[in-house]
Image (tube, rainbow, N blue to C red):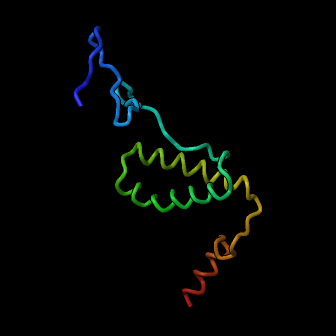
């Protein structure tokens, strides 16, 4: 699709198929961060789905993402995990996931 021009020589907003305007035309989003829906607006099921997704994509982002992508991933993960902890301050803690539990595993492995 060839760009259309206004009489002042400025590029007019292009239209995508179906008549929807191309919001990217003439719009620069560099320097802004899209982090998704505010975690406190998610219901419990949506929050868990977001947490599962971000944890699943973490390794690839660390290994192959740009510094900006990793920074954004870190911020979003902290937001989601913080919201989970806010909602579940008395969540069950597995004994093996504590420092004492780790020490016990270490001692058992030495035997």
Along the viewing direction, whichever of 74 and 7 lies nearer the viewer: 7
Q: Quadrant of residue 7?
A: top left
Identified at 55% across, 61% down, the residue is 52
Residue 2 visible, this angle? yes
- Taking the spot 58% from the left edge, 50% from the top edge, the residue there is 78
Query: Which residue reaches farthest left?
Result: 2
Residue 9 is situated, as x and y percent measured from the top left of the image, at 26, 12
Where is residue 22? Give x, y as percent. 37, 31
Indicate left or right for 63 with 93 as reference: left
Q: Residue at x 49, y 39 (%)?
A: 34
**Which residue occupies 62% across, 77% down?**
103
Using the image, determine if residue 95 lies above or below residue 22: below
State the image quarter where residue 24 is shown: top left
Q: Residue furthest top?
A: 8
Residue 20 versus residue 44: which sits nearer the camera? 20
Which of the 4 image quadrants contains residue 18?
top left
């Amino acid at each position: 699709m060839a760009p259309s021009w206004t009489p002042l020589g400025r590029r007019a907003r292009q239209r995508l198929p179906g008549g929807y305007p191309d919001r990217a035309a003439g719009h620069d989003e560099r320097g802004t961060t899209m982090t998704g829906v505010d975690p406190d607006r998610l219901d419990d099921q949506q929050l868990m789905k977001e947490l599962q997704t971000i944890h699943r994509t973490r390794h690839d982002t660390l290994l192959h993402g740009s510094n900006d992508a990793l920074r954004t991933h870190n911020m979003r993960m902290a937001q989601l995990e913080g919201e989970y902890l806010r909602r579940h301050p008395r969540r069950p803690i597995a004994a093996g996931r504590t420092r004492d539990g780790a020490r016990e595993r270490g001692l058992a492995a030495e035997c």
